[in-house]
Image (cartoon, helix red, strand yellow):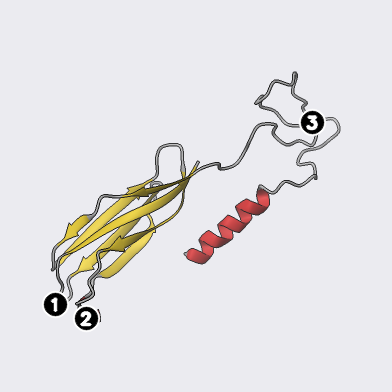
Amino acid sequence: MYRLLLLLAVCVAAACSDTQQPTAPTKGGAHTPSGSARGQLGPSQQGKPTDQVGFTKITHVITNPQTLPAGSVGELTAQCPSGSVLTGGGYSTSVFPNLSNDARPYIADSRDGGGNGWYVRVFNTATGATEILFWAYVYCAN
């Protein structure tokens, strides 16, 4: 999953790089905007938009911590704000230094939730488990 996100980031960066090569035909089909008002939409002489394009802001959204008693399963989804695009996400749990590895919670899912959010599912069902806190987070671009 992380390799796919890295590949996607590289592809986006390459697509958004500022090269001097035209992206549209230069004869017969190129449209030149009328006027030179700042921020006016339309392609430049090289066929590129004249306004700022691409993502300009990354938002980090974190859910409220959810208490997960021993012997239970919990789910959370961190949602991107409307108009933004999911770029990645994850989860965190409270510290449990006194638990053996066998008693620690099991993260069953940490993935794209399918609705512009990051989904996390935690099993806190191991023998010797204690109450924990967990939360999900998401990174969104707009």
Q: Position of residue 125 (x, y in %)?
A: 17, 71
Q: Earlier in the sequence, mark 1 or mark 3?
A: 3
Asked which secondary structure carries label 1, the reply is loop
From the image, state whether disc 3 or disc 2 is nearer to you. Answer: 2
Residue receiving disc 3: 30
Residue at the image position 41 percent from the left and 37 percent from the top: 82
Residue at the image position 56 percent from the left and 43 percent from the top: 55
Asked which secondary structure carries label 2, the reply is loop
What is the distance, in whole Å, between disc 1 and disc 3 at their CAs? 69 Å
Vertical side of 12 occupied by 97: above or below = below
Residue at the image position 45 percent from the left and 47 percent from the top: 140
Q: Are marks 2 and 1 in contact (CB under 8 Å)?
A: yes
Mark 1 residue type: Gly
Q: Where is residue 1 in the image (x, y as percent from the top left)?
A: 47, 64
Vertical side of 31 occupied by 18: above or below = below
Q: Are marks 3 and 2 in contact (CB under 8 Å)?
A: no
Residue receiving disc 2: 100
Asked which quadrant contains residue 106, the reply is: bottom left
Q: Earlier in the sequence, mark 3 or mark 2?
A: 3
Q: Position of residue 69 (x, y in %)?
A: 13, 63
Mark 3 residue type: Ala
Q: Are marks 1 and 3 in contact (CB under 8 Å)?
A: no
Q: Earlier in the sequence, mark 2 or mark 1?
A: 2
